Structures are given as C-alpha cells and as structure tokens.
Amino acid sequence: MQTMRTPLKNVRRLGSAKEGADHFWKQRVSAVALLVLGTVVVALIVSLVGADHATAKRTLANPLVSLVLMLLIGAGVIHMRLGMQVIIEDYIRGEGSKIVLLMLNTFFAIAVGVACTLAVLKLSFGA
Amino acid sequence: MAEATQRRAAAARPLSPHLQIYSPKINMVMSIVHRITGAALYVGTLLLAWWLIAAATGPAYYAFVSQIMGHPIGLAILAGYTWALIHHALGGVRHFVWDLGYGFNLFTVDAMCWLSLLASLVGTAGIWYLVLGARGII
C-alpha cells in the first residue's frame, strides 16, 4: 500500500499556505505562556477585589506586576488573534468578507494590545 | 456565469451531516464549548482593557467602573468570564496532552473531558468564594 502512494501526497517544504506549522506553533507557545501568566494575573485581580483606586494603582505600578501584565497582554492578543482567525476561516465563505474580517481581527487585537499596554505604562510612569 | 451558478445550486447534492445529526458526546460538546469560550474570551479582553484604562484614568472613573462591575449583572458577567477562562485553559491543557500523543483511547478522552469540566466549575466556585468573601457578600 505504502508504495502505491505518490510523493505528491506529502506536504513539501512549507506547504500550500507557505507558512508550515507557524500558526500551530505560535498558538501553542502563546498558550503555554498564558497558562502561567493567566494564573498570576487572576490571582492579582482577585487580590484587588474591592480595593480603592490608590491601592489598585500602587499595585499595578509595581514593576513586576507591570511586566507580567504586559507579557499577558502580548501573549493574549497573539493567541486570540490566531484563534479568531481560525473561526473566521472556518465559517465565513465569501472571499471578500473573509479578508475584511481577518483584517478587522488583526486591527482589534493590535488595538486592544496597545490600549492595555498604554494603560499599564501610564500606571507605571504617569502622574 | 450566473446560469452556471444557478445550475450548481439547483443540483441538490447530498451534504455531509452536520452537528444536529449526531447525539451529543462529551468530547464533541467540550470541543464546541472550547471554541465558544475562546470567542467569548476574545470579547472579554475588552473588560481587562476597560479595567486597566479605568485604573490609569483616575479615582473617580475607577470608582465608576468598579461600581458597574460590582453590580449583580456585572458580577454575573465576570463570573461567566472566569468560568470561560478556566474552561478554555483546561481545554488547552487537554489539547497539550493530545498534542504530545497521549490520551487517545476513548475512556481517557471521556475521563479528561469530564474531569476538566468538573475542575472548571470547582475552580470558578473557588475563585468566586474568595471574590464574594472579599466583597463581604458571603
């Protein structure tokens, strides 16, 4: 049976999309990062429940906390952009609307990422 | 061209069966819920952004946002967010096990699915026990 198969059956080099396992791998790497970072940030948020603004600001301005938050935001927007990309590619059939939605997906991920990062930086360095 | 499209549509070829034809099994339900929770978390990121922006804006706006998130409806949404996050994270762990080539026999698949569902509910309850305790509700 094996010998009946032609070499065309196999994916060659990076495959038809020319990116190989890039998407798959980035999804996994960001997922591993998010398991660790997410646990820390959930604990952080629970510890700040009911806290007043001064306490929250002081905690969030701590360099270690800011670092973890920015890493979470970075890994999070990469992961969620890849995930939503798959959902769009699975369910949107029109080529035009698919491309538009994929662009909006990227814009949304970057906008959320930059907005969160800006807020964290302002908490760290702002007045 | 238009005619060709019409002819294609008229030739009612059989479609492959979709979700509604199968009786639900725990592994497929968990797979579907994994995607739904992922999509929900995508939108939920806005809540994290809103909270960080509120903290960066100032005491008055932070108090305003805290009040909205502390309203029963806000708390319910945040509890759902917590469950979606834990469910999706544990689903991810399950997928890591499969990615590594383990856990493919049917008993293990079902057991991992039920266990992660149970753990997501227990984890959410545990976190909200702390949250509601800190707010003085319980």
Image (spheres, coloured by chain):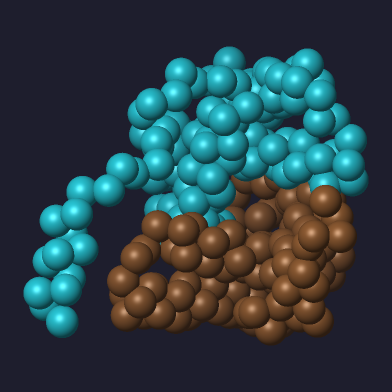
Residue shown at 40% from the left, 79% from the top: A99
B29 displayed left or right of B85: left
Residue B64 point in image, percent of width and height: 40, 53
The count of marks equals 0
B105 displayed left or right of B77: right
Nearer-the-camera pick, B39 or B80: B39
Residue shown at 44% from the left, 38% from the top: B77
Residue shown at 71% from the left, 77% from the top: A15
Q: Colour of chain B?
A: cyan
Residue A77 point in image, percent of width and height: 62, 68
Whether A115 is drawn above or below B14: the answer is below
Residue B1 point in image, percent of width and height: 15, 82
Q: Colour of chain A?
A: brown
Residue shown at 20% from the left, 63% from the top: B8
Nearer-the-camera pick, A44 or B100: B100
Quarter-of-image position of residue B100 = top right
Is residue B120 visible in this depiction of the protein?
yes
Quadrant location of the C terminus of chain B in the rendered image: top right
Residue B136 point in image, percent of width and height: 58, 23
A85 displayed left or right of A44: left
